[in-house]
Image: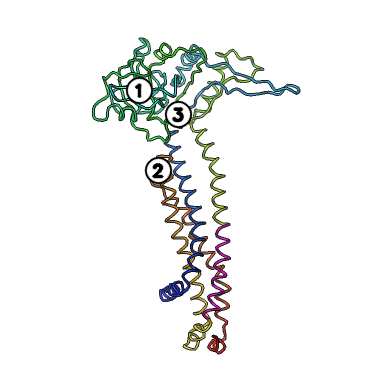
Amino acid sequence: MFLNINQSLDAIRANLLRVTFTIIIIAFGITALVVVHTSIEGMKDAMTRSFSTLGTNTFSIKNRASGAVVIGRRSKRIRYPAIEFDQAMEFKKRFEGLAPVSLNVRATGIGTVRYQTNQTNPSISVIGTDENYLKTARYLIEEGRSISQEDIENSRKVVVLGDDIKQTLFPTEKAVGKKVTIDNTFYTVIGVYQSMGSAGSSGGDKLVTIPVSTLRTVYPSTNRSFTLNVYAPDINRIDYLMEEATGTFRLIRKRRYDQENDFSLTKSDAKAKQLMENLSFMSFLATAIAFITLLGAAVALFNVMLVSVTERTQEIGVRKAMGATQNGIMIQFMTEAIVICQLGSLTGILLGLTIGNVVTSLVFNGGFVIPWLWLLVGVIACLVVGVVSGAYPAWKAARVDPIESLRHE
């Protein structure tokens, strides 16, 4: 076997230019396959970490998005009322015996946090929360404490910082107890969240949370809609709790039996699942491109092998005269085709992993990813291409008449 491989490599070196182009075509297809699937795995990992801020056993209640209905020949825009603070508090009170409930609302997504001469970019999310936020949002405290009931009752100007903000403002010192300004209002830092490692500028490391009562004072607005997060201690009861929450909130919102909900309930992992499903089209597209490219490579390799048989007719005759069998000749040419394909496969895998992980690192802030399944698919696909493309040329080489071949110029 090793002798066949060495002979195949010698034959490849003798026809280096044609073989190189074939390897490049094969490598292009495998690179496309590996790059996209590596990037997809990186995206999935980043989204999983990003959405892990809400546990799998939580669900949220939000204001229903506006929509349009068609009446006759006209369409009418429907705007659903915001979830008000009093409604959110009423729901929290009524649901208290069933499951922990947290309410939160975003004041701005372009906040700026300053400490002395250090300041963040104007891309910080300022969130108003209550004492249950840690439980329903699944954050962990790295330093200090979270917002308490007393903070809310007294509308204290205290803040918990995301890890990126802490590193920007306090790279070498503790943050707890320091005074920072958020949009020109002073707050005392009471805690720092553990790093979430989230992808993107709106991740969990780039937010600050303040008491919801403080937010209503500092950021007054009449159009702000609150979000309710409900934590199910037993994940098997989450569907039951969602039904109970729907009924309870319909009563709070004064919806009649014949009226549809003007709010929406969403499991915490629903958005992540939807995004994961959308990635399947990208996966299909990359696979299609790769296999179309491999089809072209198969045709190119078939031609290269046929030309090789013609050019090496005399060599084949000499080998047969020295005792080489038809099976031996056939195996050698098949091995050549397979070696060429696997060289293309190896080149494509190395390029694909490099490019894919660079994209994952720069765009999604992810770690090194290896899509093992698709690497195996690429290797097997190239093996099949080698066998199919090399079968007829190998058969033709094995059937060469040794006497006629020795006369061949």
Q: How far apart are marks 2 and 1 (CA)?
A: 27 Å
Place residue 257 in its image quadrant.
Answer: top right
- Kindly identify the amino acid type of the residue bearing the numbered disc 3: Asp
Dominant SS of magenta comes to helix
Above or below for 381 versus 194: below
SS at badge 1 = strand
In the picture, the disc for residue 113 is 1
SS at badge 3 = loop
Check if residue 301 falls in the magenta segment.
yes
Mark 1 neighbour density, 10 Å: few (under 14) some (14–19) many (20 or more): many
Q: Earlier in the sequence, mark 1 or mark 3?
A: 1
User: Residue 372, image x and y in percent?
Assistant: 44, 52
In the picture, the disc for residue 361 is 2
In the image, what residue occupies the spot 51% across and 40% down? 276
Magenta stretch bounds: 292-312
Q: Which of marks 2 and 1 is nearer the N terminus?
A: 1
Mark 3 neighbour density, 10 Å: few (under 14) some (14–19) many (20 or more): few
- Kindly identify the amino acid type of the residue bearing the numbered disc 1: Val
With 349 as the anchor, is 292 left or right in this view?
right
Q: Can residue 101 be seen in this view?
A: no
Above or below for 184 versus 138: above
- 103 or 160, nearer to the observer: 160
Q: Distance between the residues labelled 3 and 2?
A: 36 Å
**Residue farthest to the left, as pictured:** 173
For the N terminus, the quadrant is bottom left
Q: Can residue 394 be seen in this view?
A: yes
With 95 as the anchor, is 289 left or right in this view?
right
User: Residue 81, image x and y in percent?
Assistant: 57, 16
For the C terminus, the quadrant is bottom right
Q: Name the residue under label 3.
A: 234
- Kindly identify the amino acid type of the residue bearing the numbered disc 2: Ser
SS at badge 2 = helix
